[in-house]
């Protein structure tokens, strides 16, 4: 038995869905822990390609229990669409369970998200406009509506909606008068409509997770977004509204940290980011454009082009620390095929003082005023897409991977050399390997 957390260790879009889907073959349960439909996970299964926003990646395995945990926020229209898409392609959805404690994204949340982002103008955060931030704001502000509330009596539900709308309509009328207000009757009908559609999937998922643990099943916890987008540990305020680090797997699923055996961090072989905010290794040149085009770096949720840059070992080491990573999954190594030279950022240099910084600064001003300190590594010729073992990789590729592992102090577990499941090199399976003591990082080949 092993209970494994998979998290993004950069700014999201690292390829978590592929890694989760791969590991789900050995998992009995997959739990989505946080975020909402602002996350986008592309999963391929044969000729079928799914772009999941809420459904856990393990849904393509018919005998895997898939849980959407209490830490998520749910746009019911998006979830129902994904369920219907799965059914239409012949997939069984009876193993999907939705937490009755998860919060709902209501119609005005999306309107407010877009209006607030527009009002920020050049100071915008770069949100997806899916209403995620306002949903989490209402959750913390105690104005939220949870999945379980949909099944209250008419009297109780109407009272709850009245309380919510008094606050929201007042905000809209005073600050965003161009937005529509909502009536209790309108929102009540909306709730009952979605309650009927979601009823077969709603459950006490905390109890389900603990039952699975007691049975000794393998449980895989799936995070969304990435460490540098975490509301506490990311490049604040250019972050998401939830905890995208490994700690979010505990609070978002209802388990304690002692039940986690291993934490796998997913990183691209380079670095990307969508939206606004500082990005020290960003490349606004032909190399950056090459990474964008070869890597097909376009957001699953928004379609926006991702900003691309060299691998940043400073943020990667920081991710190892705040997540407690004991394994790395490196994706998109094949994007480097044919590139003569690769670079790794090993530190930052303060542009004002000239001081070298090895740690990740908390203040946005400090991060905006640095330049990366690089070391160069030779690339390789030819394609690695057919490599199926670590030894089959060119020596240059192995040296590059080993140097990353060495710099950030974390063992290499998985290497992805293409989008297909088969294009994956598994140095060790984090689930079947079970719980183990921390192992040393790889060393560069002499």
Image (cartoon, rainbow, N blue to C red):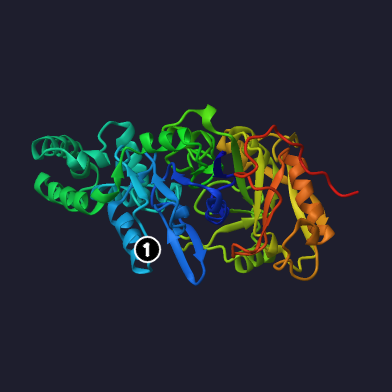
Look at 78% across and 58% down and name the residue there: 397
Q: Position of residue 90 (x, y in %)?
A: 37, 67
Q: Where is residue 391 in the image (x, y as percent from the top left)?
A: 80, 58
Q: Is 238 displayed left or right of 199 in the figure?
A: right
Q: Where is residue 110 in the image (x, y as percent from the top left)?
A: 30, 51
Relative depth, front residue between 156 and 168:
156
Residue 227 sits above or below residue 283 on the image: above
Q: Where is residue 267 in the image (x, y as percent from the top left)?
A: 63, 49
Q: Is 37 displayed left or right of 399 in the figure?
A: left
Residue 255, quarter of picture: top left
Residue 166, quarter of picture: top left
Tally of numbered discs: 1
Look at 33% across and 37% down and name the residue there: 137
Q: Name the residue under label 1.
A: 86
Secondary structure beneath dot 1 equals helix
Report the quarter where the N terminus lies: top right
Q: Is residue 231 visible?
A: no
Residue 128 sits above or below residue 257 on the image: below
Relative depth, front residue between 43 and 13:
43
Graded by Cα atoms within 10 Å as few (under 14), some (14 to 19) or many (20 or more), the crowding at tag 1 reads some
Q: Can residue 63 be seen in this view?
A: yes
Look at 28% across and 52% down and name the residue there: 76
Q: Is 145 displayed left or right of 417 in the figure?
A: left
Look at 24% across and 47% down and name the residue there: 176
Residue 1 sits above or below residue 309 on the image: above
């Amino acid at each position: 038995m092993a209970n494994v957390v998979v998290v993004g260790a950069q700014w999201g879009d690292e390829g978590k869905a592929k890694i989760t889907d791969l590991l789900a073959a050995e998992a009995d349960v997959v739990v989505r822990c946080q975020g909402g439909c602002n996350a986008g996970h592309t999963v391929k299964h044969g000729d079928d390609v799914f772009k999941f926003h809420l459904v856990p990646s393990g849904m393509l395995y018919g005998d895997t229990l898939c849980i959407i945990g209490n830490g998520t926020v749910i746009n019911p229209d998006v979830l129902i669409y994904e369920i219907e898409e799965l059914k239409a392609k012949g997939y069984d959805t009876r193993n999907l369970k939705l937490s009755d404690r998860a919060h709902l994204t209501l119609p005005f949340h999306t309107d407010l998200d877009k209006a607030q982002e527009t009002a920020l103008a050049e100071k915008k955060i770069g949100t997806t406009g899916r209403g995620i931030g306002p949903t989490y704001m209402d959750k913390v502000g105690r104005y939220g509506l949870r999945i379980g509330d949909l099944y209250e009596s008419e009297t109780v539900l109407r009272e709850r909606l009245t309380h919510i709308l008094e606050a929201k309509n007042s905000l809209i009328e005073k600050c965003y008068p161009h937005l529509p207000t909502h009536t209790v009757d309108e929102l009540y009908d909306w709730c009952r409509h979605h309650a009927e559609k979601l009823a077969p999937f709603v459950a006490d998922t905390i109890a389900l997770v603990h039952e699975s643990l007691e049975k000794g099943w393998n449980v895989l916890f799936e995070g969304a977004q990435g460490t540098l987008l975490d509301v506490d540990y990311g490049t604040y305020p250019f972050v998401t509204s939830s905890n995208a680090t490994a700690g979010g797997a505990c609070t978002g699923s209802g388990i304690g940290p002692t039940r986690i055996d291993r934490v796998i961090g997913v990183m691209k072989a380079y670095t990307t980011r969508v939206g606004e905010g500082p990005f020290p290794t960003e490349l606004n040149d032909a190399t950056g454009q090459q990474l964008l085009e070869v890597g097909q770096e376009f957001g699953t949720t928004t379609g926006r082009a991702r900003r691309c840059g060299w691998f940043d070992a400073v943020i990667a080491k920081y991710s190892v620390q705040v997540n407690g990573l004991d394994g790395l999954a490196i994706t998109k190594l094949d994007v480097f095929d044919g590139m003569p030279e690769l670079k790794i950022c090993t530190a930052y240099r303060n542009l004002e003082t000239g001081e070298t910084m090895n740690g990740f600064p908390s203040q946005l001003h400090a991060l905006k005023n640095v330049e990366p300190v690089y070391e160069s590594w030779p690339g390789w010729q030819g394609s690695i897409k057919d490599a199926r073992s670590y030894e089959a990789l060119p020596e240059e590729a192995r040296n590059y991977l080993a140097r990353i592992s060495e710099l950030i102090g974390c063992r290499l577990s998985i290497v992805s050399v293409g989008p297909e499941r088969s294009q994956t090199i598994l140095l060790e399976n984090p689930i079947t390997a079970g719980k183990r003591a921390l192992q040393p990082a790889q060393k560069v080949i002499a």
